[in-house]
Every structure is written in structure tokens, then in C-alpha cells.
Image (cartoon, rainbow, N blue to C red):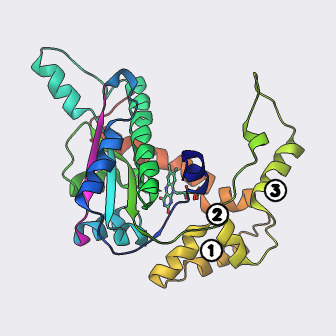
Amino acid sequence: MGLYELIMKRRSVRNFESQEIPEDVIEKLVDAANNAPSGGNIQPLSIILVREPERRAELADIVGGQPWVKNAPLSMIFCIDFYRLKKWAATFDTQFKGEKALSHFLIAYADIMCSAQNVVLLAGELGLGSVYIGTIQSSMDRGREYFEIPKYVVPMMVLSLGYPRSVPKNVPKLERAAVVHREKYRVDTDAEIAQTFEKKYGSLEDTRENYFERTFVEVVEADKQQRESWADSVKEEMKKLEIKSNAEFLFKLRYPTDQMVKMNDGLFRSLKNAGFDFS
Ligand SMILES: Cc1cc2nc3c(=O)[nH]c(=O)nc-3n(C[C@H](O)[C@H](O)[C@H](O)COP(=O)(O)O)c2cc1C
């Protein structure tokens, strides 16, 4: 399969076979991460490989009870690592203050995501499926404690991998014309924007099952893997909040916008606990 086809066929996979990933394959994945572009080639990257079932279960709990993290034979925790750089600089009578320089932090986050996406693509070529788990950021303190992560190192992303048992089909995406701007930014009208998202998500009038398959495949998959009724509780919540549009579903129910803003406090606190302070 060519690279374009691989990229176009890639889907986040949340249903894995229990089959282990061989060590030589894991080494290749790590090489792919390590050979990614890096701002100034500083490489503020550390990856924690999590394979032991007990530790996978704990990681799944840390990231908010996502069953696929427990079931995936491998999770890679991508960390911004300024500890190694600070120690190295200090050894040579130099200071590195990445933990105080927002610019270093933002570039480091871009760096580790370049590395992670290299892994996603190589994994696809090697017959593996993967899914990013961003919720590690909401449990940074617990994650740092459990994985014995030192100061100046923060776990920013998890990538769970394994051989796919099933792959989601209908993941909606914006049309090419909506995301591309030629030579300068094109400001779309409100009606055009509404139509863009209508085309992406389709009608909310569809059956709830079909709607979730398209827009919130995690609840469908979680119900299959845990036999819990997450989907039912989302349906109830939709009724209670009188959700009538895709935008409301996303920003009133799935990512309630005021709660998202409130999460700042916890995030700043966790970063501070890890020695990061940009104020
Ligand atoms: C930064 C980031 C964080 C994500 N976090 C989660 C997560 O915590 N749990 C999960 O099941 N999927 C997570 N995903 C996967 C998205 O849900 C998925 O990419 C999206 O639904 C689009 O589907 P696709 O990857 O098949 O195109 C994350 C993806 C990204 C890029």
C-alpha cells in the first residue's frame, strides 16, 4: 500500500487482539519516533513502553477508564523531557530553562507529536492499529507518580497499539475545500460554516446508534468492551440538555465548554508540580 492510501485508510483502532507485538517491531517503532523532526534537533523526548497487564490496567484507569488502553498489548507514553537536557547543560556549566520558556515547551510538544505520528504511520504499515489517548494530560500528577517520572518531565500523550480486531468505518471529516485556503485566509459566512459541519456530521435526527457510530465511536466501543451503558447515559444526557445540533452535542455534552476552561487550574497545577512555570 502506498503512503497516501495508508494515510487515507488509517483509523483510530480501539479493539485489539491480545497478540503481543514482537520486540523487534517495537524497536522499529521507537526508531521511527526517534528519527522524527525536532526543533533545533534538541529531542526533548522520552517514551515509556507499557506492556505488563497490571500496569496497562493502571494506565487505563489513570486516563479515565478507557478499556482499550488495558486491552492494547502496548502503550507508549510520550513525554516532554527537559530533565535530561537540564542535567546535560548543568554538567557543562550551562543552564537550560525549558521549564520556564513557553517557546521551548510548545516546540517540544510539536516535537513529541511528530514522533508519535511517525509511530502511527509505521505501525499502520506493519499491520498494527493505534489510538492516541490525550486524557493523560488530565491525570498528569498520578501518571508521573505511578511511572516514577522525575521533575521537568511531563507525560503529554499516550499511544495505545496492537493488532486490530476491528476498525471503525465511518469517521466523518471536513471536506477538503473547508480546510484549504489559497494564498490567504478565506473568511466563510456563518451559513457556509454551518453547512460545512452539517456535511461533516450529518443529521442528528438519525437513530442514536447511527449517530454515535459517526460522531462518538468511543461510547459504542466502550459499551462493547466493558458492557457498561455509557451510550445509554449519553442518550439520557442528550435528552436532559435538549441537544438539537452537532455543535451542542460537542460543546455542551462531550466537551462542556465551561468545564474545559475550568480544567486550566488543574493543568497549571500539574505543570507546576512537575517544575514547569511560564508565568
Ligand atoms: C490529540 C488526540 C487525543 C485523543 N485522545 C483520545 C482519547 O483520549 N481516547 C480515544 O479513544 N481517542 C482519542 N483520540 C482519537 C480521536 O478520537 C480520533 O482521532 C478521532 O475520533 C478521529 O478518528 P480517526 O483517528 O479514525 O480519524 C485522540 C486523538 C488525538 C489526535
What residue is shown at x 66% (from left), y 71% (from top)?
212
Give the residue pinned by disc 3: 198
Whether residue 40 is visible to the viewer of this picture, yes or no, is: yes
First reached walking from the N terminus: tag 2 or tag 1? 1
> Which residue type carries mark 3?
Glu
Whether residue 65 is visible to the viewer of this picture, yes or no, is: no
Tell me, yes or no, whether the two marked residues, 2 and 1, touch with CB atoms within 8 Å.
Answer: yes
Percent across and percent down for residue 39 are 39, 25
Q: What's the magenta region?
A: 42-53
What residue is shown at x 22% (from left), y 54% (from top)?
145
Give the residue pinned by disc 2: 253
Report the side of 86 relative to 107 (left or right). Answer: left
The label number, if any, that marks residue 26 in the structure image: none
> Which residue type carries mark 1?
Val
Report the side of 154 relative to 134 (left or right). Answer: left
Vertical relation: 146 (above or below) 52: above
Q: What kind of element bears circle 3?
A: helix
Vertical relation: 82 (above or below) 118: above
Quarter of the image for the C terminus: give it.
top left
Vertical relation: 71 (above or below) 179: below
What residue is shown at x 32% (from left), y 67% (from top)?
73
> Which residue type carries mark 2?
Leu
Task: Kindly report the distance in space between the C-alpha atoms of the residues bearing marks 2 and 3.
Answer: 18 Å
Give the residue pinned by disc 1: 234
What residue is shown at x 65% (from left), y 73% (from top)?
237
Q: Quadrant of residue 96?
A: top left
Percent across and percent down for residue 120 are 44, 51
Q: Does the magenta stretch include residue 44?
A: yes
